[in-house]
C-alpha cells in the first residue's frame, strides 16, 4: 500500500449552478452537516502527514464556504499544493486577492460551453460573463489557470469555441472532459451521451488545436470511455493514489463511491491514516486480489485495474465485476446498447434533462 498523492476536498455540495451532468450524489441532503473549519484543519494536517501533496478544493461550489480563506491558509501551512475547482461565481476581485494572500496555488474555472447563451442554458443560471471576468482576475493575480468544460451531446459540436475562449483568456491548460456518468449525470445519461459522429468531429478539432497551441496551452482531452475498447484506470487504481473527503467528512477512494454498498468511514470517527490503511471502503478493491475473471488472468490488469468499480456497480449492481466498458466483460452489451441508442438513425426525441438542484436542502 502506497501513500496517497492527492486529496479531493469536497467542501460543500451547495452550488449556484444546476448542471444536469453534475457528478454530485443524488442524496445531497445527507451531506448537509458540513465539516467545520477546525475539522477541515485537522483533516488537512492528517493528509499532509499521510504524504498527500496536492489538495483540490471542490464541491459543489467551494466559494460558498465563508471560511474558504481559512481553509486555504491551513492547507498552505501544511505544505499542500492547493487547486481551487470552481464555477467562479463568487470569485470577486477582493475574494481572489484574499485567496492569493492565503497561498492558493492554482485556479480551475469551469464553463459549460464556449458561448454565453449555451453556457448559461446548461448552467441553469446566467453565469458566463462572470466566469470570463473571473478568468481575467485569475490571470492578473498571477495564478496558473485551467479552464475546464464537461463535454456532452449539447456542447461537443462547439468544442472549437471553448478552445478559442480558453486561448483568449490566456489559460495555461484547457481540460475537455467527456461526461463521466455518476450522480446526476447517470440519471441523464441517455440524453447526454453524444453520438460517434459528434465525438469524431470533436477529436479532429482537438488534434488540430493541440498541434497549433503546442507551446502555449496544454490541451487535455478526457476520452469518453463508453466509446473505448478498454476502461479507464479509474483513480489510478482503487485506494491507490487518491482519496476524497465529502462535505460531511466521509472518506472515499473516489467521489462516486458513496453509491456502493460499503461501510462508511468518517474523519469524525477515525484518523485519515487509519481509514486509508484499514477501512473496508479502502481495502475492498485495493490491488488485484479481488478481481474476477476475465480481469484476473488479463495482461492489462495492472494497467486499468479492471476499470471503474462505481461504473461496474451502476451498470450491473455488483461493484466486483469487470467494468462493462471493457470489450472482454460479460456485461459489455449494457454499454453497447447505450451507445447504439445514442447513434440510432431514428433516435426518439431526447429525454428531458433533469437539472441538479442549486441548493442542498438541510434536514
Ligand atoms: Fe482491464 Fe479487466 Fe478488461 Fe483486462 S479484462 S482489459 S483487466 S477490465
Ligand atoms: Fe469510483 Fe471509478 S468513480 S472507482
Image (cartoon, rainbow, N blue to C red):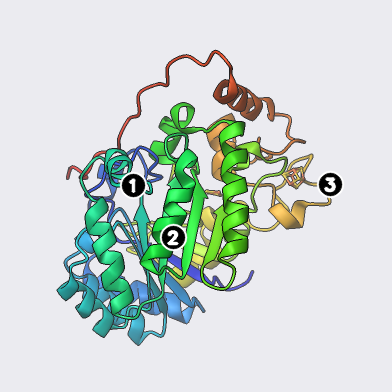
Q: Quadrant of the C terminus?
A: top left
Disc 1 and disc 3 in contact, CB within 8 angstroms: no
Pick the front one: 78 or 197? 197
Question: Quadrant of the rendered structure where residue 154 is?
Answer: top left
Check the image and report above or below for 32 versus 336: below
Reading the image, the residue beneath label 3 is 297
Check the image and report above or below for 40 versus 305: below
The residue lying at 52 percent from left, 16 percent from top is 347
Q: Quick one: SS at disc 2?
A: strand
Reading the image, the residue beneath label 1 is 115
Instruction: Say the numbered circle drawn on residue 244.
Output: 2
Gap between marks 3 and 2, in whole Å?
Answer: 30 Å
The residue lying at 48 percent from left, 66 percent from top is 173
Residue 180 location, x and y as percent? Answer: 50, 44
Question: Quadrant of the rendered structure where residue 61 is?
Answer: bottom left
Q: Quick one: SS at disc 1?
A: loop
Gap between marks 1 and 3, in whole Å?
Answer: 48 Å
Residue 42 location, x and y as percent? Answer: 32, 75
Pick the front one: 174 or 3? 174
Disc 2 and disc 1 in contact, CB within 8 angstroms: no
Q: Quick one: SS at disc 3?
A: loop
**Residue 251 seen in the figure:** no
Residue 181 location, x and y as percent? Answer: 49, 39
| Callout in the foreground (1, 3) | 1
The residue lying at 79 percent from left, 46 percent from top is 296
Gap between marks 2 and 1, in whole Å?
Answer: 32 Å
Badge 3 density bin: few <14, some 14–19, many ≥20, Cα 10 Å: few
Q: For this view, does 119 lie left or right of residue 286? A: left
Q: For this view, does 183 lie left or right of residue 99? A: right
Badge 1 density bin: few <14, some 14–19, many ≥20, Cα 10 Å: some
Question: Quadrant of the rendered structure where residue 57 is?
Answer: bottom left
Q: Quadrant of the N terminus?
A: bottom right
Amino acid at each position: 500500500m502506497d501513500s496517497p498523492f492527492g486529496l479531493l476536498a469536497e467542501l460543500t455540495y451547495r452550488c449556484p449552478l444546476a448542471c444536469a451532468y453534475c457528478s454530485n450524489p443524488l442524496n445531497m441532503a445527507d451531506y448537509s452537516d458540513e465539516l467545520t473549519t477546525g475539522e477541515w484543519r485537522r483533516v488537512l494536517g492528517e493528509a499532509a502527514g499521510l504524504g498527500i501533496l496536492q489538495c483540490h478544493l471542490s464541491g459543489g461550489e467551494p466559494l460558498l464556504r465563508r471560511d474558504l480563506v481559512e481553509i486555504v491558509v491551513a492547507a498552505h501551512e501544511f505544505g499542500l499544493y492547493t487547486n481551487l475547482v470552481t464555477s467562479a461565481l463568487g470569485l470577486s476581485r477582493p475574494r481572489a486577492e484574499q485567496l492569493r494572500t492565503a497561498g492558493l496555488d492554482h485556479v480551475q474555472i469551469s464553463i459549460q460551453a464556449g458561448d454565453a447563451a449555451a453556457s448559461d442554458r446548461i448552467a441553469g443560471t446566467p453565469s458566463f460573463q462572470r466566469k470570463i471576468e473571473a478568468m481575467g482576475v485569475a490571470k492578473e493575480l498571477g495564478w496558473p489557470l485551467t479552464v475546464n468544460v464537461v463535454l456532452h451531446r449539447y456542447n461537443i459540436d462547439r468544442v472549437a469555441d471553448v478552445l478559442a475562449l480558453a486561448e483568449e483568456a490566456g489559460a495555461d491548460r484547457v481540460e475537455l472532459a467527456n461526461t463521466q456518468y455518476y450522480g446526476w449525470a447517470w440519471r441523464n445519461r441517455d440524453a447526454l451521451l453524444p453520438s460517434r459522429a459528434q465525438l469524431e468531429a470533436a477529436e479532429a478539432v482537438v488534434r488540430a488545436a493541440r498541434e497549433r497551441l503546442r507551446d502555449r496551452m496544454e490541451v487535455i482531452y478526457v476520452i469518453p470511455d463508453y466509446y473505448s475498447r478498454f476502461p479507464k484506470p479509474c483513480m489510478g487504481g482503487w485506494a491507490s493514489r487518491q482519496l476524497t473527503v465529502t462535505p460531511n467528512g466521509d472518506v472515499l477512494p473516489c467521489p462516486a463511491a458513496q453509491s456502493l454498498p460499503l461501510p462508511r468511514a468518517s474523519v469524525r470517527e477515525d484518523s485519515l491514516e487509519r481509514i486509508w490503511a484499514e477501512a473496508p471502503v479502502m481495502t475492498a478493491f485495493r490491488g488485484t486480489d479481488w478481481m474476477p475473471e476475465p480481469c484476473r488472468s488479463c495482461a492489462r490488469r495492472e494497467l486499468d485495474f479492471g476499470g471503474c468499480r462505481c461504473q461496474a456497480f451502476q451498470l450491473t449492481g455488483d461493484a466486483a465485476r469487470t467494468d462493462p466498458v471493457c470489450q472482454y466483460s460479460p456485461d459489455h452489451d449494457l454499454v453497447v446498447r447505450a451507445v447504439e441508442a445514442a447513434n440510432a438513425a431514428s433516435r426518439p426525441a431526447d429525454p428531458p434533462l433533469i437539472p441538479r438542484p442549486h441548493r442542498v436542502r438541510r434536514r
